[in-house]
Amino acid sequence: MTTETRLRIAMQKSGRLSDDTQALLKRCGLTLNVTDRRLLAHVANMPIDIMRVRSSDIPGLVMDGVCDLGIVGDNTLEEAALERELMGQKSQYIRTSQLNFGGCRLSIAMPEGFDYQGIKSLDGLRFATTYPQLLNRYAKEQGINVEFCLLKGSVEVAPRVGLSDGICDLVSTGATLEANGLVEVEEIFKSKASLIQTASALCSEKQSILDTLLPRIQGVMKAKESKYIMLHAPKDKIAEVSALMPGKETPTILPLAGRDDLVAVHVVATETFFWETMEKLNALGCNSILVMPIEKMMG
Ligand SMILES: Nc1ncnc2c1ncn2[C@@H]1O[C@H](COP(=O)(O)OP(=O)(O)OP(=O)(O)O)[C@@H](O)[C@H]1O
Ligand SMILES: O=P(O)(O)OC[C@H]1O[C@H](OP(=O)(O)OP(=O)(O)O)[C@H](O)[C@@H]1O
Ligand SMILES: [Mg+2]
């Protein structure tokens, strides 16, 4: 197959999204030979090439059709789309699916001790940020004027060195804010990683590879969120046990060799299976309760 018919996917070379992206593609059955220096990696067992770049370059590569697909944070995507619109450049893409990693939020944070009395307290202040377009859009919506200074990383240091009054940066655990004496005052954008696709139609060869890949991605995500639960339950407690099972799947009830009083109950749980539920099952007389990860799911 020529390179023109190989599907090209852009992913972050190294950083917060690269391990999860690589793991997702591997779980979809792609044999990836990624080494640090290989920036265009050929997938050995499928007509796919992986282009490893800076995350901030991914939206443009997909919008310009250089890559057919990309995996990038919604924050980076939205920022790039706003910036390109402002510059009159093409900013179309298709969000093919939202992925279940890279969860974070873009927030405004102020130094501890700042007297925050609502959004108007931020009027006229200066913020360090990697996301000026998202901040600007939010400020406009809120009817305030803000100034910004652009920093590509270590944004949290800016107020302490007198570069800005506050910051607008990504938060996940909040540990970086805390370590730098900052307090979150407004959340302005919620983000997760997304799979995006170029807006132009793909040739039939590429479309057919994508048609194989997409159900696999959905299957991997569904499996990641699901657990296979097995337990032994008293026969006369089946109704109560079934009612405690998370998700909408009907449990499978199987006889146990040599036991008239117990049955085996198997179920795929699509919701979180809490310790509390296990304790309740235990109190009903269930034992051998196993919660196992699922690798792949289809149908
Ligand atoms: N603390 C975090 N927790 C979870 N996800 C995060 C966190 N920080 C960033 N992200 C997500 O991961 C993406 C990549 O972040 P990372 O810091 O690795 O790269 P970057 O500096 O934004 O981009 P580049 O690859 O262009 O250097 C972010 O755009 C965001 O979607
Ligand atoms: O709320 P937390 O869990 O502490 O995470 C938030 C931090 O993570 C990201 O930075 P990263 O570590 O990617 O470094 P960077 O500034 O070099 O991008 C983000 O820009 C914050 O600084
Ligand atoms: Mg970062």
Image (cartoon, rainbow, N blue to C red):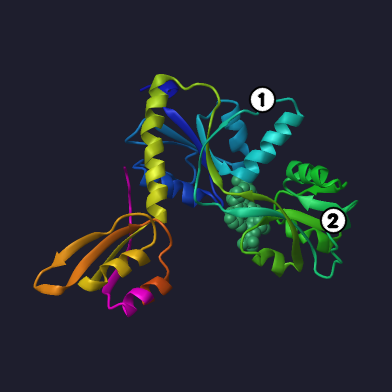
Q: What residue do we see at 73% from left, 45% from top?
A: 131
- Residue nearest the observer in this picture, 239 or 48: 239
51 vs 162: above or below: above
Mark 1 within 8 Å of ligand 1, using the beta carbon:
no
Q: Quadrant of ligand 2?
A: bottom right
**What residue lies at 12% left-to-right and 73% top-to-bottom?**
260
**Mark number displayed over residue 160:** none
Q: Nearer the viewer, residue 4 or 122?
A: 122
Q: In the rendered structure, which disc, 1 or 2, sits on the residue that comes first in sequence?
A: 1
As for residue 41 lying within the magenta part, the answer is no
**Residue 293, position as x, y percentages in the image:** 34, 59
Residue assigned mark 2: 164
For the N terminus, the quadrant is: top left
* Residue appearing at x 34%, y 36% in the figure: 44
Q: Residues within 10 Å of mark 1 (few under 14, many from 20)?
A: few
Q: What whole-number distance in Å separates the C-alpha atoms at marks 1 and 2?
A: 32 Å
Left or right, residue 291 beside residue 14: left
Which residue corresponds to mark 1? 90
Question: Looking at the figure, which quarter contains the C terminus?
Answer: top left
Question: Magenta residues?
Answer: 280-299
Position of residue 6 measured from the top left corner of the image (x, y, whole percent):
41, 27
